[in-house]
Image (spheres, helix red, strand yellow):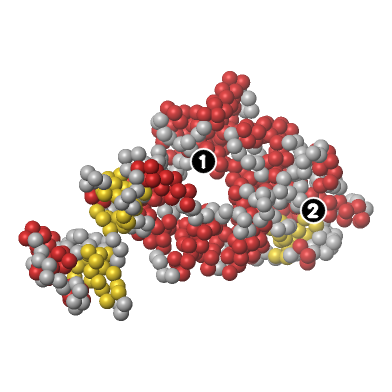
């Protein structure tokens, strides 16, 4: 708020609280016979009191002026109703001089630090000393001094250093005070932000003080305010939860199973951010599939189709694609047609016939027990492939985000840059991995646009991509690597992870080499990617987020233990196609 003088002059908004002149003058100790100098009185009459009075509260909550008696006298003479004050001593920044030999070579005055000072002011006093020359020098708190300047503050709190402190003692103080300061851990900072919110602080104020985004504060408050989500974070207290991961937890506030899966990935001494990222991606992928399945069910019900659960079907029931001599159009008129969601990993309902023999359909001839065993084996195999596809899709999401971050990074190490250049050179000179045939294909273009961070409009025309990326020649290795990475990613399809009868070595082998390239650049593989890179089978039922393939064993041993080497039974030829569609 602004403060009006008797002459109607408004002072500029200031970060100081105000107190009425009448309240100060009611205490005899404040109304001294001090006379304001003429120049001070003229300034106060024109601009109001700009320099806050130092006022403390004594016993009985009585305001006592410690510094500013002449300013109070000028305010009385000018007829001001209220004046600014501070409950602790402050000094103008312009009166201070930074220490010429500050021990910190890098002050690290980042945007977050400056924004916190701008929002809440400088809370920790700087330690100052008046030199023989009259200069007031900052002995401790030079980072606060410079940051406050950048934040546009006019004053900082202060305390006087010992008058007899020599130069050697100043440097010793710089060392000891720096060592005594211990920053808050992430968990402590998060708890402090939540406590501030509970105490009534607004999101914007908390965000500025902590130097984080407002959406980060909202995610933190939502998690800590929810009993289930808060318990999940506490259960994995040894893991440093990022704001993005906390926000992801809020997505699944209505899904205890998903929260439990994410929490398990964050639990344990070796939990990594990458594992939690993969777990979140898996749960998002499953949720997307459920949403698609629900949408498909709504379409079927609107069309008058009968929906059944798999458990409701008798042993006679058979998928429509196994019926002989009847088309999908013809079977649509069959009274025995029902639609079933095959398993929890499906995103579409499949047509079945509840009793093929009863409704005149021809079924494959086979022994009853054999048919049942084959059907169960095929169903189990298909379910395993669908589960693996979810893990693969989730890993792809995490991997491509990591590649995109690598491409836009402004702080690549020399080794990382050289590794990128080596791979680009190999790809261009050797023409390996389908580079010549796949570079300009539509799927590659879509992937490249995502890796480069282009928006929908920018991604429409491949010929304009170069216009939308950084022109800095130092980023050329990253941009060239992006084009090669898009080709590699386009070729890294789901078939790369499968083994047994569905193994596709022409996809798996180059994908394994690609994953090793990414690992050399710092990428941490998920278990399914590690399986591909090491040529081992992957069992989605046994390899969950946060786990790794057994070490010291040959792939054949893992295959025998997991039971996913040769596909059980004799699945139908269309099994792989069905799983790919899923």
Residue under the point 19% across and 67% down: 83
Report whether 380 appears left or right of 158.
right
Secondary structure at numbered mark 2: helix
Q: Position of residue 31 (x, y in %)?
A: 16, 73
Give the side of residue 192 with respect to residue 273, left or right. Answer: left
- x and y percent of residue 324 in the render? 81, 50
Residue 405 tag number: 1
- Position of the N terminus, as image quadrant, is bottom left
Judge whether residue 230 can be spotted in this image: yes
Considering only order in the chain, which callout, 1 or 2, is on the residue closer to the N terminus?
A: 2
**Horizontal and vertical percent position of residue 293:** 64, 58
Name the residue that disc number 2 marks.
379
- Label 2 close to label 1 by CB (< 8 Å): no
Gap between marks 2 and 1, in whole Å?
A: 39 Å
Residue name at image x 52 percent, y 55 percent: 185
Q: Residue furthest front?
A: 164
Q: Quadrant of residue 37?
A: bottom left
Of residue 435 and residue 88, the one placed in the foreground of this image is: 88
């Amino acid at each position: 708020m602004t403060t009006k003088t008797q002459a109607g002059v408004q002072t500029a908004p200031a970060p100081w609280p105000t107190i009425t002149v009448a309240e100060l003058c009611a205490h005899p100790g404040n109304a001294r016979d001090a006379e304001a100098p003429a120049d001070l009185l003229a300034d106060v009459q024109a601009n109001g009191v700009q320099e806050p009075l130092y006022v403390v509260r004594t016993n009985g909550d009585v305001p006592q002026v410690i510094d500013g008696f002449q300013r109070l006298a000028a305010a009385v003479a000018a007829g001001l109703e209220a004046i600014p004050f501070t409950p602790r001593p402050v000094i103008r920044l312009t009166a201070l001089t930074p220490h010429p030999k500050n021990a910190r070579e890098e002050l690290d005055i980042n945007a977050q630090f400056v924004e916190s000072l701008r929002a809440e002011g400088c809370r920790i006093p700087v330690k100052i000393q008046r030199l023989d020359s009259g200069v007031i020098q900052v002995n401790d708190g030079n980072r606060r001094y410079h940051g406050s300047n950048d934040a546009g503050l006019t004053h900082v709190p202060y305390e006087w250093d010992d008058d007899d402190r020599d130069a050697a003692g100043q440097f010793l103080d710089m060392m000891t005070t720096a060592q005594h300061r211990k920053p808050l851990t992430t968990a402590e900072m998060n708890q402090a932000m939540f406590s501030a919110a509970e105490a009534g602080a607004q999101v914007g104020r908390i965000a500025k003080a902590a130097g984080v985004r407002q959406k980060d504060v909202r995610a933190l408050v939502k998690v800590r305010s929810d009993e289930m989500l808060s318990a999940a974070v506490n259960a994995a207290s040894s893991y440093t939860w990022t704001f993005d991961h906390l926000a992801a937890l809020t997505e699944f506030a209505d899904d205890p199973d998903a929260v439990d899966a994410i929490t398990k990935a964050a639990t344990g001494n070796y939990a990594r951010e990458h594992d939690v990222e993969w777990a979140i991606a898996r749960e998002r992928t499953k949720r997307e599939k459920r949403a698609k399945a629900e949408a498909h069910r709504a379409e079927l019900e609107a069309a008058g189709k009968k929906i059944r659960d798999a458990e409701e079907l008798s042993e006679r029931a058979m998928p429509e694609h196994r019926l002989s001599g009847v088309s999908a159009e013809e079977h649509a008129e069959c009274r025995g047609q029902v639609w079933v969601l095959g398993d929890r990993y499906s995103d579409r309902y499949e047509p079945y016939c509840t009793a093929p023999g009863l409704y005149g359909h021809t079924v494959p001839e086979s022994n009853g027990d054999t048919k049942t065993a084959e059907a169960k084996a095929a169903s189990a195999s298909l379910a395993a492939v669908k589960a693996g596809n979810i893990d693969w899709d989730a890993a792809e999401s995490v991997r491509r985000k990591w590649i995109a971050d690598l491409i836009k990074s402004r702080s690549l190490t020399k080794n990382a840059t050289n590794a990128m250049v080596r791979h680009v050179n190999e790809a261009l000179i050797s023409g390996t991995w389908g580079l010549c045939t796949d570079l300009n294909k539509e799927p590659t273009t879509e992937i490249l646009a995502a890796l480069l961070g282009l928006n929908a409009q920018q991604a429409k025309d491949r010929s304009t991509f170069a216009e939308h990326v950084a022109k800095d020649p130092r980023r050329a290795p990253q941009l060239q690597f992006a084009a090669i990475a898009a080709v590699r990613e386009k070729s890294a399809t789901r078939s790369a992870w499968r083994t047994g009868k569905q193994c596709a070595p022409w996809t798996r082998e180059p994908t394994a080499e690609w994953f090793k390239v990414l690992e050399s650049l710092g990428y941490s593989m998920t278990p399914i990617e590690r399986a591909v890179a090491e040529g081992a089978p992957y069992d989605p039922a046994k390899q969950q987020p946060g786990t790794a393939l057994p070490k010291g064993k040959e792939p054949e041993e893992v295959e025998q233990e997991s039971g996913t080497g040769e596909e059980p039974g004799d699945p139908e030829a269309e099994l792989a196609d069905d799983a790919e569609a899923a």
